[in-house]
Image (cartoon, grey):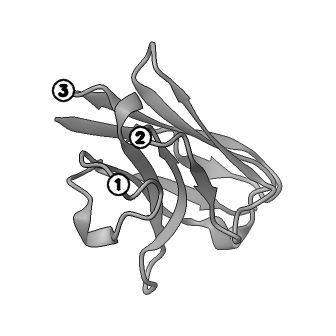
């Protein structure tokens, strides 16, 4: 099982990015995939989630209205489309998966089974 996060980069404030989380070794549409981010000196923060088990999704208030999570089952990939980016969105973004059932998008952080390697998002002029 592997998760490959990509799509980060340097973007100006107000810009957009699409982060990708490509899964291998399992079929992600059955399971929960979440995005987290961690900025230097800050706690890891949940950003968004999509659940295959119950079809639910969740977006953090910090990015609500500016971000959309989606899934392409044919490509076994989850996307996080982010727009209206702000300097405070600067962080390393990680995707993670929980291969169990029953939590939907409320999986305790410590229960996630696999994590991607992270992709850096830097918002700066």
**As displayed, is residue 14 above or below residue 69?**
below
Q: Between disc 1 and disc 3, whose residue precedes?
A: 3
Residue at numbered disc 1: 102
Give the residue at x 37% y 63%.
107
* Distance (Cα) linking label 1 and label 2: 8 Å
Q: Could you tell me which secondary element the residue under label 2 belongs to? A: loop
Q: Say few, some or many: other residues with alpha carbon within 10 Å of mark 3 (under 14 / 14 to 19 / 20 or more).
A: few
Q: Is residue 62 left or right of residue 66?
A: left
Give the residue at x 83% y 55%.
14
Please tell me whether mark 1 or mark 3 is closer to you in this view. Answer: 1
Q: Is residue 105 left or right of residue 12?
A: left
Residue at numbered disc 2: 53
Give the residue at x 45% y 62%.
36
Image coordinates of residue 85 in percent, x first then y, are 74, 58
Q: How many marks?
A: 3
Q: Quadrant of residue 30?
A: top left
Image coordinates of residue 97 in percent, x first then y, are 31, 48
Image coordinates of residue 88 in percent, x first then y, are 66, 73
Q: Between disc 1 and disc 2, whose residue precedes?
A: 2
Q: Is residue 98 left or right of residue 18?
A: left
Q: Pick the residue in front: 109 or 80.
A: 109
Q: Quadrant of residue 43?
A: bottom left
Q: Residue farthest to the bottom?
A: 41
Residue at numbered disc 3: 25
* Distance (Cα) linking label 1 and label 3: 21 Å
Q: Say few, some or many: other residues with alpha carbon within 10 Å of mark 1 (under 14 / 14 to 19 / 20 or more).
A: few
Q: Could you tell me which secondary element the residue under label 1 belongs to? A: loop
Q: Which mark is residue 58?
A: none
Q: Quadrant of residue 109?
A: bottom left
């Amino acid at each position: 099982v592997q998760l490959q996060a990509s799509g980060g980069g340097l973007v100006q404030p107000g810009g957009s990015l699409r982060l990708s989380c490509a899964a291998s070794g399992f079929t992600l549409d059955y399971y929960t995939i979440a995005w987290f981010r961690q900025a230097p000196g800050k706690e890891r923060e949940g950003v968004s989630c999509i659940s295959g088990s119950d079809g639910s999704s969740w977006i953090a208030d910090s990015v609500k209205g500016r971000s959309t999570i989606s899934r392409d089952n044919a490509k076994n990939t989850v996307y996080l489309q982010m727009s209206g980016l702000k300097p405070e969105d600067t962080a390393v973004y990680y995707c993670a998966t929980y291969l169990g059932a029953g939590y939907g998008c409320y999986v305790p952080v410590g229960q996630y089974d696999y994590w991607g390697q992270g992709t850096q998002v830097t918002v700066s002029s």
